[in-house]
Image (spheres, rainbow, N blue to C red):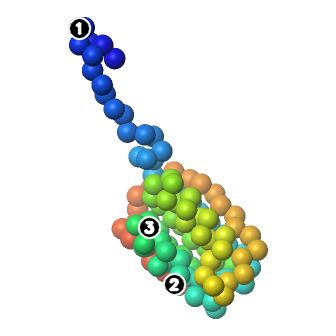
């Protein structure tokens, strides 16, 4: 960009680097009784994500992740594998706007 004959370089941050998103995730398979929640919490904390994870009465695990899109995508990819004793058959993901309501990442009961 040129202003009054002086070339100016304005570097905008990359949109994806600054875009916080929320992923609402439902994980199916053999995902309860295998430390899925604790492992999810440990992984999410290592990635500095915010949100929560909980067991559902129907045997699935539900989680909400908020953070930078690329990091949330990494977490969702991890959910497709899970901890060593888990057997994941499906991961349903719904992306939503980030609300910023969480301070950290926890396990809900």
Q: Residue furthest bottom?
A: 33
Q: Earlier in the sequence, mark 2 or mark 3?
A: 2
Label 2, label 1: how many angstroms apart (C-alpha)? 59 Å
Name the residue: 69% across, 67% down: 91
Q: Position of residue 38 (x, y in %)?
A: 51, 84
Of 22 and 87, nearer the camera is 87
Q: Is residue 29 above or below residue 21?
A: below
Q: Position of residue 16 (x, y in %)?
A: 48, 45
Q: Is 14 placed left or right of 96 in the picture?
A: left
Q: Position of residue 22 (x, y in %)?
A: 52, 57
Which quarter of the figure has residue 49? bottom left
Label 3 with label 1: CB-CB less than 8 Å: no
Label 2 with label 1: CB-CB less than 8 Å: no
Tell me the number on the disc at residue 96: none
Q: For mark 3, does the 10 Å Cα neighbourhood hold few (<14), some (14 to 19), or many (20 or more) residues?
A: some
Q: Would residue 98 be seen by someone viewing this image from the given angle?
A: no
Q: Nearer the viewer, mark 2 or mark 1?
A: 1
Q: Would residue 35 be seen by someone viewing this image from the given angle?
A: yes
Q: Earlier in the sequence, mark 2 or mark 1?
A: 1
Q: Secondary structure at mark 1?
A: loop
Of 2 and 107, nearer the camera is 2
Q: For mark 1, does the 10 Å Cα neighbourhood hold few (<14), some (14 to 19), or many (20 or more) residues?
A: few
Label 2, label 3: how many angstroms apart (C-alpha)? 14 Å
Q: Residue furthest top?
A: 5
Q: Earlier in the sequence, mark 3 or mark 1?
A: 1
Q: Position of residue 96 (x, y in %)?
A: 56, 53
Q: Is 16 placed left or right of 59 in the picture?
A: left
Tell me the number on the disc at residue 4: 1
Q: Is residue 23 above or below residue 41?
A: above
**Dot 3 corresponds to which residue?**
47
**Dot 2 corresponds to which residue?**
38
Which quarter of the figure has residue 3? top left
């Amino acid at each position: 960009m040129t202003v009054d004959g002086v070339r100016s370089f304005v570097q905008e941050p990359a949109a994806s680097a600054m875009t916080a998103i929320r992923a609402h995730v439902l994980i199916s398979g053999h995902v309860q009784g295998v430390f899925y929640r604790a492992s999810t919490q440990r992984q999410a904390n290592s990635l500095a994500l915010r949100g929560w994870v909980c067991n559902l009465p129907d045997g699935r695990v539900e989680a909400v992740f908020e953070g930078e899109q690329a990091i949330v995508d990494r977490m969702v990819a991890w959910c497709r594998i899970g901890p060593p004793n888990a057997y994941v058959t499906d991961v349903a993901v719904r992306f939503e706007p980030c609300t910023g309501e969480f301070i950290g990442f926890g396990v809900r009961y």
